[in-house]
Image: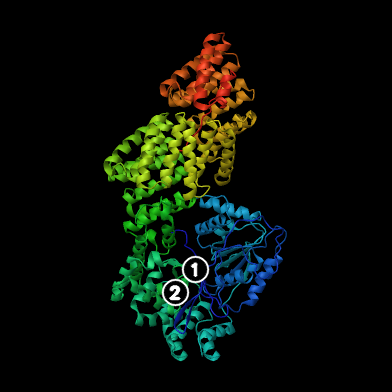
Amino acid sequence: MTLPDEPPAKYWINSKGHRGLAAQHIDMVVNGDLVLTPAETVTGGTPTPADSGPELRGPSAGIGPKYSNAPQKNPSFTGRDDVLTELHTTLAEGTTALVAAAPQTLQGLGGVGKTQLAAEYANRYRAYYDLIWWIDAEQTELITSALAQLAERILLPVGGDVEKAAEAAQDALRRGVPTTRWLLIFDNADAPADVRRFFIDGPGHTLITSRNPNWSGLAQVLPVDVFDRSESIEHLCNRVPGLSEEDAARVAREVGDLPLAVEVAAAWLATTGIPVDTYLTQLKAAAPRALAAGEPPLDYPAPVGQTWNVSIARLREQSPAAVRLLELLAFFGPEPISLRHFFYSESMRLALEPYDRELAEGFMLGKVLRAVSRYGLARVDTANDSVQVHRLVQAVVRSGMSEDEKSTAAHEVHRILIGARPVTGDADDPANWPAFEEIWPHLSPSRAHNCDEPDTRELMIDRVRYLWRRGEFQQARHTGDLLEEAWTAKLGDDDPQILLLRFQLANVMRTQGQYALAQQLDQDTLERQKRVLGEHHPYTLRTASSLAADLRTVGDFHQALALDRETLQRLREQLGEDNPRTLSCANNLAIDYRLTGDALAAQELDQDTLDRRALVLGPKHPYTLSSKSNLARDLRAAGDYEASVTIHQEVVEALAEVLDINAPEILRNATSLAVSLRKAGRQTEARRIITETYERYRERYGENAPDTLACALDLAADYSAGGDKNAARDLARQVHVGHQQLFGFEHPFTLACANNLVIYLRGSGEVEEAVELGRRTVGTLQRVLGPDHPYDLNAKINLANAYADLGEYTRAEQLELAAHRGLTERFNGHHPDAVSCQSNLAVTLRALGRTAQAAELRARALTEFIRQLGEEHPNTVSARGWNRINRDLESQPF
């Protein structure tokens, strides 16, 4: 099994710009002292319109990129002027009006300094760009994340969906927003087929570093070789005081002029002060050990492995704990490793204490880290709170270990990663995401997916859950599928953790719109969990709640209600009423009540869940605010429109503090707020909000996603309320077809679209078609949901209006009487829907010549509208003018 590769290493160059371990800051060892340069400089600001042209401006004092996350300039960089000049010339000459130069690839061996060359280019020519964005490109999801961070930096209106945010950043740069002068650097992009989709055909520049030689056809390739001898000599002489050029040449020859090896040799000589002859003798003795063990050290020349082995041998004499630390770091990812989360953790201290009893005191860990960094084997960046080991050093360290030693070290790393997992909460809590993001890059290098320890497998399941919650659905599905296949082969179909993983996969499938597959997987998982864990186990109950969600997606609201009722009762017995899992199930049961038409039960349960979540999770936790938004929906269904508006607006303000502007929770609440505003008669506000929200949905999800279609249905209602019946009809037709394709012809949400289309067909003069569609819709709703469901009762109001347009007043009266009776029984006679039906009935009776009865009904309706909604509300105006009132429907989140 192969999981996606983890992020790339960064090389750095000391002395004359000679490449070695690149970084967001540079460590140098001078006379035995560790010198740290400042950390990465990141600037930002408000995006500005694209400048007038893409041509590169000449450098001028004080000009630099407004947006940048590029590594800070290495003050020790020298040499490579010919490569940098050629690169700059090629990019500049390839740029024409609104067309990017061809991507340029710096290609060469690991350790030759490709990354540091790219960093030097970004700093040397920074005056030519307004935006420079550095992207770790070895792992595709990290490219996506980096582009999403760029979208956030340039203040694009994006939310928690990382993939959509990345796409928004690409589109903006393609259009020259916020500038045409941009530079993207894809560092360590060693899979051309995976990376090419992120290239942007726009007015800026793209630079790639790669060990892979197969870039021709996708980019222009600029080979990067090892140092020439003069560069190696210059570097060594600058780093090692008193070293002669002749001795420097001997050292350079022995390490093959590989920049990273040259720097490690320089650090060793500068730190130890031993004679060059002694060092060269040690190098020659170490050569066999460098390449003899099981793992080949990547693609560097054979002689250079000895360089690190000499330093490691000396380190072993001075600090066995430092060597053990280096062995453990060899199984982390090659990118920066958090000191706070991993190195200064109790798990790390326990792993190192057997090698140095002084480490019983945690503050002594620093001396171990210093010992490793002094010999150039690791780079410590205190400003960024990280330590980094180059992939070549990692490979050499691993090559000197037996298979048993490798396995033991990897498992130690797994325990360190587990120890860094947030103590409270889970992957659903945004407050925990930064901690999880420190862990994820190190799972694959440590082969965590192959670990047999349950805690490590749980961390891998957390990974799938996290990806799903962040909107990275494809990556979540890919990772989950790989784990499911590998683990099932080892553990069998009934292992509890396999079943937990399948529960997470079903969530992803449902979100992707694969409703039948999700239901099938949840059903199978639930049956196995009942057999293996028992019917009352929390995992079993969690899957049961997930199966209820599947039932809702296929329109079986009543069966979902029955299942969630049973599940909630069992969760309360097992975990208590205030457990977050119990409250999640209570939230889902309230959805069932709402979808089955019991708004009062939904309101009561949502209020209770909101109160409990506010105490358990906090008043501004996304789940708490979701319950509050649901409560606003319940109030609207109960006819209290102004209260619904007020609560929705409170949720808007609170969500803005904790989530991005385009987070799903924010968009759903905005959609619902617009509906409440329209119901309250505030049509201008409603139209503005729903229009903005619909555009954000389209940009993020596409036109045919479930949430986009739901928002479009409400937008059509606003078109109609504003008098544009044709626009409402056309959009409703489109939404109706979309629902048919997504849910089927008889799903309640598809029928809600049909009901609204009946209204707009009447409004545009297509009455006969409205009657035919209305008849089919009411008949199907009665069969699917029952004759007393609010959807059915309100659809009868609209069908009655269509019959009346054709002069069939007797049929209209029968429908209106049935609808009024049902609405009064379900709510009460004062509910706005019941009053609307009463007002319409008065219009029908008047047309039938029963004027006295009509006048009495209309007077009572008018009085009630004025009391509840005010003199100027559209319903009041319609009743006063003896005009018919329509009743549109909405779909709702599952």
Contact between marks 2 and 1 (CB within 8 A): the answer is no
**Residue type (three-letter) at the residue carrying disc 1:** Ala
Does residue 640 sit above or below 12 in this rendering?
above
| Quarter of the rendering occupied by the C terminus | top left
**Residue 512 visible in image:** no
**Residue type (three-letter) at the residue carrying disc 2:** Ala
Badge 2: how crowded within 10 Å, few (<14), some, or many (20+)? many
Give the secondary structure at mark 1.
Answer: loop
Quarter location, residue 152: bottom right
Report which residue position mark 1 lands on: 9
First reached walking from the N terminus: tag 2 or tag 1: 1
> Can you tell which mark lies on residue 543?
none
Residue 753 lies, in percent from the top left, at 54, 30
Distance, label 2 to label 1, CA atoms, is 12 Å
Badge 1: how crowded within 10 Å, few (<14), some, or many (20+)? many
Residue 843 lies, in percent from the top left, at 56, 15
151 or 780: nearer the viewer? 151
| Quarter of the rendering occupied by the N terminus | bottom left
221 or 791: nearer the viewer? 791
Does residue 521 sit above or below 339 in this rendering?
above
> Can you tell which mark lies on residue 378?
2
Residue at the spot 37% in from the left edge and 76% down from the top edge: 367
Give the secondary structure at mark 2.
Answer: loop
Residue 757 lies, in percent from the top left, at 57, 28
Does residue 619 sit above or below 193 in this rendering?
above
